[in-house]
Amino acid sequence: MSEADRIFDELGNTLSRWGLSEIPFTESATFLRQSQLRDVFTGRTQELRDVLALFQGRDRKRIFVYGWAGIGKSAFILEILGVLQRKAKDTLATYISLPPETDLATASLIALAREMEDDEWAQHQLNLMGLRPRKRVVQKKGRGKAGISSFGIEAEQETVPVSALQVPTLSFEDLLERALEKYSRVVIAIDDLDKQDPARVRELLRNAQGMLKGGAWFMLTGHPSGLTRDILTRDLGLFDLSIELKPLDQPTTYRMLVNYLNSARPKNARRDPDDPAAVRPFTPEAAQVLCQRSDGVPRLLNRLGSYVLLKAAHLHADLITLDVLEQGLIYAEQQLRGQAGLAPEDYYVLDLVLERGTLSDATVTLVDLERLKAQEFSEILPILEKLVQFDLLRRLPSERAAEFQPTPLLMPKPSRKQTDNPD
Ligand SMILES: Nc1ncnc2c1ncn2[C@@H]1O[C@H](COP(=O)(O)OP(=O)(O)OP(=O)(O)O)[C@@H](O)[C@H]1O
Ligand SMILES: [Mg+2]
């Protein structure tokens, strides 16, 4: 057996000693299968109520879901779409993460066409854009040798050069009309508006007003930057309901941890959240500390959880006690700081925020900027945003200018704490 085989088996054995089939944590909700999301999705009861109530009515609605990175926007809309797919048979629920350089009509068209597998025209539209049709219109049949067509394989691998749609809004409306012949409701969820430049998103929304107010339901997501304030105030009327996802409270976070762990246990071994063994291999105390550390942000719980389990496996720990947890948290910090894709200038900025505790246009000094070879705070904003995406910083939910703080995954610098508090 090779060393790699041995390590692989050892990890598997440790997990099965803990009663888990795999490490259940993930960074993004889009990595989860629908059944997995259903197992782990926790809380958000009022928000679900608010949105699902709208689906009892006939009028189509536009819903905006917003919240900070990793708070659970994708999970929330995917959970809603899952319920609709399971329970509302007359509804066609579609999802797309907004691709770069794409307008909202084209994105909507792609989302819809992908779900209309049996509609040749829809599949043709995808093909026109250079996207792979969901289902081959013609099934491979017969035993023809390569290149020699037998029954009906002519159309199979035909590809057409990528071309942008001439009038995406009209193409979308045509397709929507076709969809509405079969379904009484079509829902288009467009995720990740915030992953693009705010000015561009504003323009996208402006250009899409007509479509958004047309015959489909829309669910859009973004984060509460200047963009959201604009949408909520200036562009009021564009959305019927705006929902802010806030950090989860401690008991809900704990229940979420139980749900994740249960999702990797055999069905008959799943435990009730009140059972202290529900958080195994964590001890209840360690589980509580882990939840506090995650600060109610689901992605932080997922990232920390997975690093801590890996470290505990490495230590051959049967139980994750407070002591093992501490080592896991140190390991998590090392891993987070060592993520691929971070450049030296990112670390300069990160270290500055760690030194300061909070950094904003108001608190940055000329000396700081000089150190970072920048003239204005706005020049380091892209780096700060990048560090947010890497879960190293978070943007404070302030109405004022952008303010950044280290995430609770990073330990406060001990030396600084000591000097800050001489007593
Ligand atoms: N209510 C929830 N219950 C259980 N898990 C959740 C919940 N909300 C989010 N998660 C999990 O937390 C992680 C981050 O969630 P998600 O991907 O939805 O965040 P996001 O707000 O869309 O982040 P981003 O801003 O990067 O798009 C995922 O693994 C997701 O499954
Ligand atoms: Mg998301």
Image: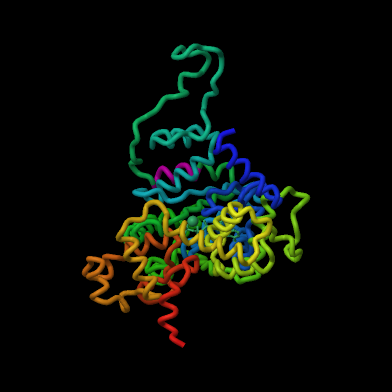
Out of 341 and 94, give the one closest to the viewer. 341
Q: Is residue 20 visible?
A: yes
Rendering coords of residue 131 (x, y %): 42, 36
The answer to whether 285 appears left or right of 131 in the picture is right
Out of 40 and 294, give the one closest to the viewer. 294
Picture layout, residue 323 above or below residue 123? below
Provide the residue span drawn in magenta.
Answer: 169-177
Magenta stretch, main secondary structure class: helix
Q: Is residue 240 magenta?
A: no
The answer to whether 399 appears left or right of 85 in the picture is left
Rendering coords of residue 268 (x, y %): 78, 50
Quadrant of picture, ligand 1: bottom right
Quadrant for the N terminus in the image: top right
Figure quadrant of residue 419: bottom left
The answer to whether 273 appears left or right of 153 in the picture is right
Out of 1 and 152, give the one closest to the viewer. 1
Rendering coords of residue 82 (x, y %): 61, 51
The answer to whether 295 appears left or right of 40 in the picture is left
Looking at the image, which residue is at 46% across and 22% down?
155
Picture layout, residue 13 above or below residue 261? above
Out of 32 and 188, give the one closest to the viewer. 32
Q: Is residue 84 visible?
A: no
